[in-house]
Image (cartoon, grey):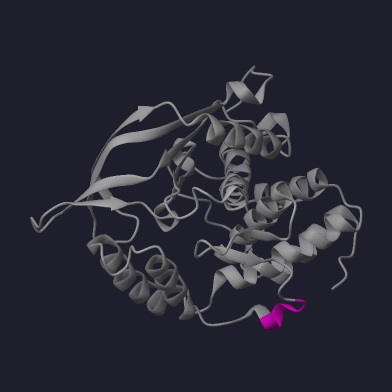
Amino acid sequence: MKHGRSDARDILILSQTAEHSFVSGQFPDERTEEKFDRVSIELALGSLFQETFDRCIALLPREFWPERCEVVVQSQATIHFSDGAEPEATPLSLILSRQQPSRSAIQFAIHDIRHDAYAMQSILAHELGHMLIEWACRSQGVTKAEDEVISHWSKSIYEGVADYVGSLIAGQPTTGGPNCWLNRNILEFDDFNKSIRSSEAIPDLVESSLSKHGLFPKYRHYRTWLTSIRGILKEHMPQDPYSQGQWVAGRLWKATKSGVKPETIIRAAIDTALTGKTILDPVEFVNQIELQTSFRVRP
């Protein structure tokens, strides 16, 4: 993981896809036989993404900097189906973006946000917020290189740190925007208990966004995706981790606004992650950050 590069611009590899195709799998993020050509990214997107990456990587101590990070922008793909049904040329919504820490890569689907610079910057920074923790944990062997994501934090903590980074880099306490399903105000919840809610509304929120952009119910992949995700959430994730993550992000944001440097907060989060200790409770996590930064975050 460690290297001799001194410039963040040597790390980021940007491209966008052409001739993109894959076979839709049984699960929401499952793709097989994926193929695409990499072509040069549009100049305006490249400048925005490079700036976003530079500001995110600056939060990470250099000892944890990766050798490379690839961001591949995706807008459309020909999706094939295992039952032999007719393939569909399908616009790729943000919901199909994939963070791939084991490859130090992000597949960033932008059909529904390509004209919303704030959403693109805040969401890319959100994904890179995940990667800051992943790079640190993988460099120290806390997480195995082949593991999909770190496993010793709950999803609410994992998402909360990323939402904090997304809002921090974009400059407002929101991640995403009204043009996509990801539209989070990290100051929405002043009390953790208020952030505890059912995950049942998540698929409805996604369906509404996809419908707004003419993607659902028109395209089979989104119909299958929504059916699958409803079942997965009902069985495995009854509580909404994103709302609880908003509370975490909001507490970190308030600490920053009260004078704690963002680098200090990220370092505290990394140090907490590097212990390898399993932390599932967002309140316990925030308490750990407060202890390490010697600052009591006020509601």
x then y, percent, for residue 164: 70, 56
Q: Where on the picture, by quarter, is residue 153?
A: bottom right
Q: Where on the picture, by quarter, is residue 30?
A: bottom left
Residue positioned 63% across, 62% down in the render: 157
Q: Is residue 175 left or right of residue 61?
A: left
Residue positioned 91% across, 53% down in the render: 259
x then y, percent, for residue 142: 58, 44
Query: In the displayed image of the protein, which residue is found farthest to the top?
Result: 4
| Foreground pick, 227 / 280 | 227
x then y, percent, for residue 273: 66, 51
Vertical side of 167 occupied by 137: above or below: above
Q: Where on the picture, by quarter, is residue 296?
A: bottom right
Q: Quadrant of the N terminus?
A: top right
Vertical side of 210 occupied by 199: above or below: below
| Foreground pick, 86 / 71 | 86
Taking the magenta stretch, the answer to whether it contains residue 255 is no
Task: Look at the magenta stretch and give its main secondary structure.
Answer: helix
Q: Which residues are magenta?
A: 190-194
